[in-house]
Image: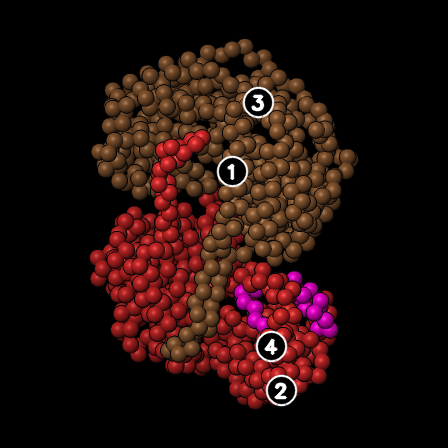
Chain colours: A brown, B red
Amino acid sequence: MLLQGKSLLAGLTGATGGTVFRAINPATSESLAPDFHEASLAEVDAALQAAAAAFEDYRARPPETRAKLLDSIAAEIEALGDTLLQRAQAETGLPPARLQGERARTCGQLRLFAQVVREGSWVDARIDPALPDRQPLPRPDLRRLLIPLGPVVVFGSSNFPLAFSVAGGDTASALAAGCPVIVKAHRAHPGTAELVGHAVVRAVAACGLPAGLFSLVHGGGSTVGIAMVKHPAVAAVGFTGSHAAGRALCDAAAARPHPIPVFAEMSSLNPVFLLPGALRERGAALAQGLLGSFTLGAGQFCTKPGLIFALRGPDTDAFLQALATAVQGAACATMLTPGIQAAFVENRAKVTALPDVKILAASGVTPDAKKTQGQPSVAVTTAANFLKHPALATEAFGPFTLVITATSADELTACVRAGGQLTATLHGTAADLAAAGPLVALLEQRPGGSS
Amino acid sequence: MLLQGKSLLAGLTGATGGTVFRAINPATSESLAPDFHEASLAEVDAALQAAAAAFEDYRARPPETRAKLLDSIAAEIEALGDTLLQRAQAETGLPPARLQGERARTCGQLRLFAQVVREGSWVDARIDPALPDRQPLPRPDLRRLLIPLGPVVVFGSSNFPLAFSVAGGDTASALAAGCPVIVKAHRAHPGTAELVGHAVVRAVAACGLPAGLFSLVHGGGSTVGIAMVKHPAVAAVGFTGSHAAGRALCDAAAARPHPIPVFAEMSSLNPVFLLPGALRERGAALAQGLLGSFTLGAGQFCTKPGLIFALRGPDTDAFLQALATAVQGAACATMLTPGIQAAFVENRAKVTALPDVKILAASGVTPDAKKTQGQPSVAVTTAANFLKHPALATEAFGPFTLVITATSADELTACVRAGGQLTATLHGTAADLAAAGPLVALLEQRPGGSS
């Protein structure tokens, strides 16, 4: 299948003017054909107007139509076969097994949302019948249900080229709810985006739905993205990526004359707490598990544990020894893009250059003249130092983690109060967890926080 | 009961320094004793810190404790007896029957939330048990439920001194959910606020709960309000009032390092659509009903119909004639505050001074040298003119409404697209409603909009 390198705008292909870019194979640093053409703001505006018009039609369609569209998109993605997997591998450096699994997850998500739409209870209908004899005033018949908001702009992620991208979870849920979708393709995998985008376009046409229901936009930097979030036709935004980019979109959405919601999954350090009993009983296994977790996908998961908390003592010393040995033997891995690799090296250096931070271990480096690899590494510091230097909570997106040793449970609690996270994890025995009530209560309130 | 004129800060009374103000009897324009003392920012900070500390305790309490607190607040409010109603009447000019009804509603809300807390399903618990044999990966045990956010700042409204004020719906729902509350009292009825505030403080103490669970702050202008919304201890905001003030709070909340939600009910024009069949069948009754609706409470309800849409024709002419006659015979009524009266006169003049707006009728004015009264009045214009002058959609909070006559259904639709509203109403026959599908579809998406 020949790639065209153009945006897909409400069933039409974009123009070939404007800035051009190419995907880069992160394993070889070679650029990949063809050229991709950024959409103009006028093209984006036309796509959003078409989405608004398509919304008036689509929102009135019966649930079965939406469900069939989702099933049809899944089938079209599967029909792309190895073409899709090969292009995705070339653009991301992710191994074939991972991409096969991610494709299965993507199609599974689409079909899951189709089931939810058919089942129907997601509209959360409430019917309070009239009470004409109620005192002091009669109650009228009251009804409420969830309805679609309108066109949704989806920003695809770098690290999930299928499952959180063109036809990923955000797109599936928006289409399921009755909302048109305009995807801003991630520049790291434009060819993968185009292939999946064509699959969606085919499904929309096969279901007899208006072409404005779906568009795929190529664009550079934040100009096109911010313009879309500010556009009056847009009703909501889905985003997966860095905190800086997500926050800029949130701010633009909140400043609109009519603010709109931004559903953003942004960077996170995902703290892990290793409680004393767990360290005593299974310290070596925790070290091995932690290595697997922070190096999985070259550390490029939104849930990668970036901060490991433990109380000081001989069990923690033994754990650190086991972790150091494991990390030294770990393999380097190709990172998603040259930019992500450079940011990883830079952010890790920001953390390790701070006072009283010690490199505990790093894996042996193979020659990496092309700067494509992520090197598994771990550093240690104290809780007192962590509280003194907020920059220690900098996310290094990649295979790096920071162990923080505390002298007391109060020090741990103080560290938790310093910020919100996407996830938090505790490893403990039953006795550990029974004693960790205050820490658990505090952690309950932190994950999901955006900063 | 002697009023002290001080803030109630986590069980302590505020200092007597700083700026002083008094409530004004809107019916007589006389100021009411005693002086009220604005809280300092340091006092507000202390109250919010106390709320954060109280949250750690309160959130862990069983549902029955929260339910008892709500029931106890309702009983304490009722125990205030006529003292409360008399002060509320002096501060707001609202008639005794209305205030009795509002007190019943307020206590009813508190007891309703107590029932909801006892029943328990509001936490929306989801339990997905582990599937250890799931392919390709096992599923762990997954659990989810709603939890309280933390301290909530509530801004009381001018027009509901009880039901949307110190112990109103926002406060009841926050306490029910497990959140401490800090109320910013409305300057129009500080004595009413103090009485209810003391009732809440007594209930908190009687239930053995930490005093930081509730504070009542007197403050001027927006300084104290914005400071509270920006305070790191605050987790959410409840607001009822003008669009300008509510938007300022929303913007401050969105700009925080960690943004927080603002649940704001802001000004609205609440458009009403009179469809042809309804006008033909019951035009005179609609005119009488409309008069009652837009003059209820001197037009100071959030749901007051401020825009009336109808298609041009003889039935609409007859309706306008009936409306004019009804309005001419209507009585003036005392408005809530001198400021609200002045703003009403000013905003009505803004609308009626625009080109091609005609005063249809106004009630006979009794001498009003003290400028306390709201004069029922109605103006007419065309849909074409409405689309040309966005300022025609200015809310005049008070007993004024604007009738807009359209030449076609398309013109009506264009008017709807011009903005969002809190409510929308259609009067129609079965045939009218069957023919109004596109209008209904559009209106479904508008109410709830914030601008």
Q: Disc 2 designates what residue?
A: B322
Comparing labels 2 and 4, the label whose residue is closer to the camera: 4
Q: Quadrant of residue B181?
A: bottom left
Give how far across and how far down residue A277 sits, in percent. 24, 28
Nearest to N terminus: mark 2 or mark 4:
2
Question: Which amino acid type corresponds to the residue marked 1 in the rendered image?
Answer: Gly
Question: Which amino acid type corresponds to the residue marked 3 in the rendered image?
Answer: Gly
Range of residues picked out in magenta: B406-426
The quadrant of the image that shows the N terminus of chain A is top right
Question: Which amino acid type corresponds to the residue marked 2 in the rendered image?
Answer: Ala
The disc placed on residue A211 is none
Discs 3, 4: same chain:
no
Comparing labels 3 and 1, the label whose residue is closer to the camera: 1
Instruction: Work out how far the residue at label 3 is from the one at label 4, CA to CA, in angstroms.
Output: 64 Å
Residue B238 in view, yes or no: yes
Q: Disc 4 designates what residue?
A: B429
Give how far across and how far down residue A301 sits, in percent. 48, 30
| Number of numbered tags placed on the structure image | 4
